[in-house]
Image (cartoon, rainbow, N blue to C red):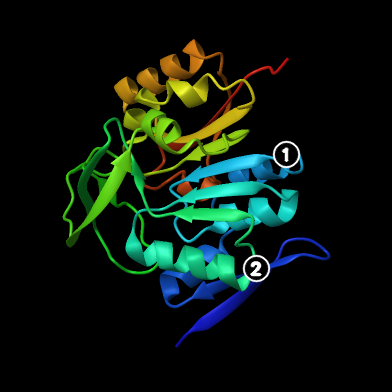
Amino acid sequence: KILKKRIKINEIKFIDFFCPNQMTASRVNTIFSKEPETIEWIDSFENDSIFWDIGANIGLYSLYAALVNNAKVFAFEPAASNYFCLCKNIELNKLDKQISPLCLSFSDYTKIAPLNMISTEFGSSQNEFDHEKNDLGQNTEFVFQQSSIGFTINDFIKNYNPSLPNHLKIDVDGIESSIIKESSMLLSYENLYDVSIEINEADEDVCEKITNTMNKFGFLLKQKKHASIFDKTEHSSVFNFLFSREIN
């Protein structure tokens, strides 16, 4: 059964979501409770800002930013089923002039490689581009390999000259450090104000690499948060790290 869910975001605005299965419905139902720190961060955006959402899934935060702050959004999602939902959600809300969905991956090399998927269901996560471990560093069973084109952020900018973001989110369940490694052209952009990166702090090496790279470009850790529902789960060490810098 095809289901459309409407989420009220304030007294006058709402978002419609295409929910073809229970997983997408659950994502929509928990938009304000699963990552309240991400909602709080997006609420702080200035109007008409530019937002890159790397790992957009079905577009929860892309649509929210577009409607709350009139942000121009680039939403990156390589998984075919999620990309379909992302595009459908953009269509339902008539945001095709404001949100640009792109079905591609990011990594530390520009290449065509497998997107290793633990599920092909709409709304699934934990899919890894050219990587065989999940966000906890564990080996996992994949049910399908979907080919994907992947770019370094530097190559993507050089090849396509997109509008650069004021705000950047990276949530790809495992290879955030690989993406950050080859993103100097973006991190040196003077109007990039802050970056939210999902990091497993139990992986001290990855945590240190990302933090050192961000510090190199003048970004300092402002906060690290996750919802209390994760405190006693296997993801208790995974947080959204928010790095920001002073803008002259």
Most foreground residue, 22 or 186: 186
Quadrant showing the N terminus: bottom left
Most foreground residue, 47 or 233: 47
Most foreground residue, 159 or 226: 159
Residue 146: percent from the left, percent from the top?
22, 58
Query: Disc 2 or 1, which lies upstream in sequence?
Result: 1
Most foreground residue, 203 or 14: 14
Q: How many marks?
A: 2
Q: Secondary structure at mark 2?
A: loop
Q: Amino acid at mark 1?
A: Ser
Q: Are marks 2 and 1 in contact (CB under 8 Å)?
A: no
Q: Which numbered disc covers residue 44?
A: 1
> As displayed, is residue 150 above or below residue 91?
above
Quadrant showing the C terminus: top right
Q: Amino acid at mark 2?
A: Lys
Residue 119: percent from the left, percent from the top?
27, 63
Determine which quarter of the picture holds residue 224.
Answer: top right
| Residue located 39% across and 54% down the image | 103
Is any part of residue 39 visible from this angle? yes
Q: Nearer the viewer, mark 2 or mark 1?
A: 2
| Residue located 20% across and 46% down the image | 113
Residue 238: percent from the left, percent from the top?
42, 38
Q: Mark 2 Cα within 10 Å, few/some/many (few <14, many 20+)? A: few
Q: Secondary structure at mark 1?
A: loop
Determine which quarter of the picture holds residue 152.
Answer: top left
Q: CA distance from mark 2 to mark 1?
A: 24 Å
| Residue located 58% across and 55% down the image | 99
Q: Mark 1 Cα within 10 Å, few/some/many (few <14, many 20+)? A: few
> As displayed, is residue 178 above or below residue 19?
above
Residue annotated with mark 2: 94
| Residue located 28% across and 66% down the image | 120
State left or right for residue 210 relative to residue 136.
right
